[in-house]
Image: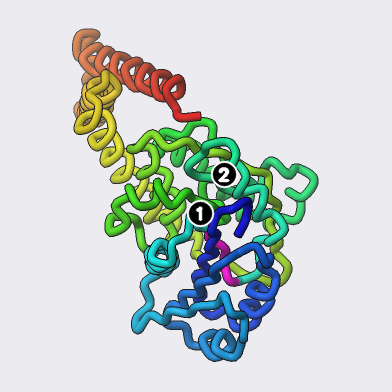
Amino acid sequence: MYKEHRIAVVIPAFNVAGHIAGVVRGIPEFVDDIIVVEDAGTDGTAQVVKGMSDRRLTMVQHAENQGVGGAIVTGFRLALDHGADVIVKMDGDGQMDPNFLPALLDPILLEGYAYAKGNRFLCEDRLPEMPRHRLLGSFGLTFLSKLASGYWHVFDPVNGYIAIDARMLRKLPLHRVARRYFFETDMLIHLNVFRARVKDVPVPARYEDARSSMRVGEVLVTFPLYLLRGFWYRIYERHVLREFSPVAVFWILGSLLLAWGFAFGAFTWIRSSWTGHVATTGTVMLSILPFILGFQLALQAILIEIQESPR
């Protein structure tokens, strides 16, 4: 128990045989349940976990690999069945320092937040330890993730060191949450639908010799598509279905006008290049005016969301 609340730690584990024992042993005594979800790995992770004698430890094995998101969802559901009040997700590769568990739990138990997440960028003295490609990738994805999730005050959206109040977790449609690397950002998207308060907590990462299995090419191709789908899902669920808001009107009209302005402008430019005839002022304005108006509507929607972002 931690401050009279039952705490569960969920550890998705895929080919982490060299790290998982140290991760489990490092979890503080105040944690009531440790749930390891072995995601159909091939390196003997399950055997290592079976050989441990921690009374708090439960292991679930997937017959087929479901991705980190699928493993976490399995662990979340089991933690809820065990009666946890707060559930923490830690990776099985040793990159998340268990000494920071209280820093994640206190905002939920003492300050009324529904969700707390680590933010490596708030620990500036430790940033040089972060691999450069991860540093650049996190910066690049942050703006798009803010746009998709609606949490403009949150940084480091792909940080997987998270804690969530069980009452909020029960509200989320876990069957809809992304099953692979998009999981952390997708959680924020679903949380925003319920106006859940989210807090960034300074938590440095520990990289050591661990390597991410995420492929840069996969991220560049799939993340923008996931973000676009998640963005429109959130706009509909929150700003149309649950509480109709001008944000939805601004985004829909703004997107249509931006698309028309860009498409018609590109068509006009290509046609002029092929024919050698300069487009008339009126033709040019048919592209520029909708584009400018669409941009202004989108900007207004962003400003409203920044003001209304749950804090």
Residue 309 can be seen, yes or no = yes
Whether 303 is drawn above or below 176: the answer is above
Instruction: Give x and y (percent) for residue 242.
Output: 23, 31
Q: Which one is in front, 224 or 150?
A: 150
Quadrant of the rendered structure where residue 254 is?
top left
Which image quarter is the N terminus in? Answer: bottom right
Residue 19, given in percent of the width and then of the height, sits at 65, 77
Task: Please indicate whether residue 57 sits to the left or right of residue 262 in the image.
Answer: right
Is residue 276 in view? no
Please give the name of the residue rendered at 58% of the width and 80% of the height, measured from the top-left corner: 55
Q: Work out whether 119 lies above or below 131.
A: above
Q: Is residue 242 magenta?
A: no
At which x and y percent is residue 301?
A: 35, 21
CA separation, marks 2 and 1?
8 Å
Residue at coordinates 38% horizontally, 37% vertically from top-left?
192
- Mark 1 lies on a secondary structure that is strand
The circle on residue 109 is 2
Can you tell which quarter of the image residue 206 is in?
bottom right
Rate crowding at label 1 as few (under 14), some (14 to 19) or many (20 or more) other CA atoms within 10 Å.
many
In the image, the segment drawn in magenta is: 88-92
Which residue is located at x 28 percent, y 33 percent? 238
**23 relative to 2, above or below:** below
* In this rendering, position of residue 73 left or right of residue 101: left
| Observer-nearest of 177 and 133 | 177
Task: Tell me the number on the disc at residue 69.
Answer: none
| Residue hosting label 1 | 86
The amino acid at mark 1 is Val
